Amino acid sequence: MPTSRATSQAGPLARLGLALGLALAACAGALTPAAAAPAAGHGEYGEYVALGDSYAAGAGVPAQSAGLCLRSDRNYPSVVAERLRPAVVRDVTCGAAKLAHLTEPQRYPVLGQVNAAQFDALTPGTRLVTMTLGGNDMGEGLLGMGEIVVTCVTVAVVHPFGSPCRSAYGDSLDRRIEAAGPRLAAALQEIHRRSPRARVVVTGYPAILPENPGDCLFRQPVTRSDAAYLRDVIKRLNAEIADRARANGATYADVHTPTLGHDICQAPAQRWIEGVLPHQPAMSVHPNARGEQVMAEAVLASLRRAQAGAPVPARPTGRATGRS
């Protein structure tokens, strides 16, 4: 099976990457629980809860808190909160989070729990929820999307031509995206159940790789063919997230389009998504501070459009819907 081949090729480096990542994260701050942060004003959204993974947490962007969650005070939820000025903000985003971590604590071997179940932050009084999740469900291990990065970089070093990453994964990433769809739909239904008056905004993922895969030549350790392959995987992930959001009473925020031309394969000054070796403070293959700001702007624009076109949604009824 392609997945087992990928795992065997990158196993030692993946374990090294996990160990290094956890060690660096431990230096970023103590393991602190998420707290409700009072804001200075009261907007339409009196209570705001941010759910998500490292793309929402702003992993590596200073200043960091929440220990291994790598949560930044310049992540997109912080920018959204600064603009909307809710009375209460609960940011429970956490690096490496998967959809399962909405309902169960996030743990690492030896280190134990690093984040409570993210849904614990929701209340009946929550009026705004943002969520960025699903990407890490493409990976089978603790690293999530990081596992795929490690694998594809490793095989590109060994096989610098052709499509070594595509050969390693085949269509398994597409199957994992499809499998995550129903879980995402069920999660959205649960948000509506717990916080029936909340407006829910779900983001996709930014443009990590360029439309022209040739841009990556001599800039990132990925072959031209694999750059196109992985670019299209992210597009399919975003399409799945968008479909599930719209079918389950949520607003979809497109963060891919506004980040086009600012991917990991552009010149360092043009990158909003950092490369394998970051030039600005951020985790590898993650948004930098500017990238987080652009994601926030996309969320706020989606909110404005939703406000102009529809009232705060009532709680959807029935089973989770969407493509299955």
Image: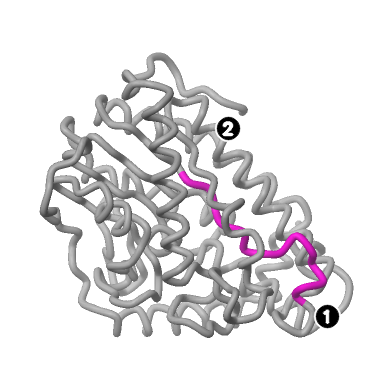
Comparing 230 with 174, the one in front is: 230
Query: Which stretch is magenta?
Result: 203-216
Quadrant of the frame with the C terminus: top right
**Residue 126, x across and y down, in percent:** 21, 36
**Residue 2, x across and y down, in percent:** 76, 59
User: In the rendered image of this protein, does residue 2 appear above or below residue 30?
Assistant: above
Comparing 208 with 53, the one in front is: 208
Residue 207 shown in magenta: yes
**Residue 238, x across and y down, in percent:** 60, 45
**Residue 264, x across and y down, in percent:** 63, 72
Residue extending farthest to the top is 318
User: In the rendered image of this protein, does residue 173 appear above or below residue 113?
Assistant: above
Residue on which disc 1 sits: 159
Q: Earlier in the sequence, mark 2 or mark 1?
A: 1
Comparing 239 with 134, the one in front is: 239
Q: Main secondary structure of the magenta part?
A: loop
What colouring method underlies this structural image? Answer: one colour
Q: CA distance from mark 2 to mark 1?
A: 36 Å
Q: Give the residue displayed 75% in from the left and 77% down from the top.
A: 155
Callout in the foreground (2, 1): 2
Residue on which disc 2 sits: 243
Q: Amino acid at mark 1?
A: His
Badge 1 density bin: few <14, some 14–19, many ≥20, Cα 10 Å: some
Q: Give the side of residue 30 with respect to residue 166, left or right.
A: left
Judged from the image, the secondary structure of the residue bearing numbered disc 1 is loop
Q: Give the residue displayed 78% in from the left and 61% down from the top.
A: 228
